[in-house]
Amino acid sequence: MLDKLAERIATLEESATLQMAALVRELKAKGEDIIDLTLGEPDFDTPIHIKEAAKSAIDMGFTKYTPVPGYLDLRKAIVEKIKRDNHLTYTNDQIVVSTGAKQSIANTVLSLINPGDEVIIPAPYWVSYSAITHLAEGKVVKVSANIENDFKITPAQLEEVITPKSKLFIFSSPCNPTGAVYTMAELEALAVVFRKHPSIIILSDEIYEYINFIGVHVSIATLTDMYDRTVIVNGFSKGFAMTGWRLGYIAAPLWISKACTKMQGQFTSGTCSIAQKAGETAMTGDMQPTKDMCAAYQKRRDIVYELLKKIAGVKTNLPTGAFYFFPDISSFFGRTDGQSIIKNSNDMSMYLLSDAKVSTVSGDAFGDDNCIRFSYATSEEKLRMAMSRIEQSLSKLK
Ligand code: PMP
Ligand code: GLU
């Protein structure tokens, strides 16, 4: 039967993050004591005022199909948010609300990429950028950033991979999986290169905007000449702890927002009415819960960083945003626990799952096989225990 499937699904990579999450769920159901650091998902509940808004949306009858790009009131609230936080002006038509930022990315890539177009993606990258590019039959051009440069690419590296076929550049800042945050100066240095190549569109994934420990979030769209060629992707999952609500959006040049609306009109239509009304309250309401969550992540980041630095053989950057560590564990490659040899990041992730009972995601899914990713969006107690278990398991590798 498998040979009856379309090539596009047969060759599609399964989301490594979701695959590991499913495996962990299965093991936990069997009673295994796993500390789950797999998914990038806030452990906090959605703030109460947002939940209340959803409840009253149901009572008020917001239960019908919605306009394809989202309720006008929500799009207006997003326009105001972007003005307030990012100092950028958009019209309501430039905003398209989708079923999660993941769909926003898919809409954008499928709307822009023809077979053979090149999509430049700095690695480490979030798993779905490459998979969605492959679905669109685009060619992924990977630019590897190294840990010594805080996993950020340099302008020279960008310049080197640009060809006449380069169509799109996709990156996240704050970054999943590395936690790296590009400063204004670093973005400006990349913008200097982009100005020489005006046909390249930039997809700037800013979903971790509010989980930023350096205090300033800069959107590349604010830099000279970048607005008309940047698609900002953002969403509610991380900053407002709303992963299950499935709500994300783009702010884009009108020709792209129109294309994405057309695309979405044939795939999903407008996203859930109730989630949209909740999102409107998130955009306009009290930001204190978001600030409190960010402070908690920063405290956990500090705790984990101190513990991780002490583990022999592990190399890490200091993440300045998001809620992930992406340590380099390649010094263990070739070593063994007496049963099997650790040859790559997948072996390491599976070893830590079976020996330390700590779940991580292998780095190769993020374009860097020297590393593994773990999320620290969980309690301090679990994080301390996880680091101690990892240290013990790694010390057994000879
Ligand atoms: N971009 C990045 C960098 C992410 O980590 C995620 C994962 N949640 C998404 C986009 C998609 O988010 P969602 O679909 O939940 O809005
Ligand atoms: N973005 C999250 C992560 O990287 C959620 C999983 C997913 O959507 O792939 O873990």
Image (cartoon, grey):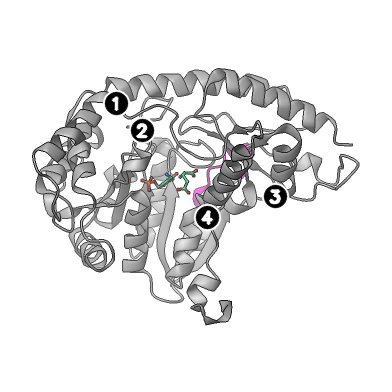
Q: Residues within 10 Å of mark 2 (few under 14, many from 20)?
A: some
Disc 4 on helix, strand or loop? loop
On the image, the x and y values in percent for residue 118 come to: 46, 68
From the image, tell me which residue sits under label 3: 346
Label 2: state its secondary structure.
Answer: loop
Which image quarter: residue 196?
Answer: bottom left
Q: Are marks 4 and 2 in contact (CB under 8 Å)?
A: no
Q: Which of the pair 148/261 is nearer the observer?
A: 261
Instruction: Using the image, tell me which numbered label, if any, was put on residue 15.
Output: 4
State the SS at label 3. Answer: helix
First-in-chain label (2 vs 3): 2
Label whose residue precedes the other's in the sequence (4 or 3): 4
Provide the residue span drawn in magenta: 146-157
Residue 126 coordinates in the image, percent (x, y): 50, 49
In the rendered structure, find residue 47 and report the number of the disc placed on it. 1
Q: Position of residue 340 (x, y in %)?
A: 86, 47
Q: Alpha-carbon neighbours of circle 3 within 10 Å: few (<14), some, or many (≥20)?
A: many
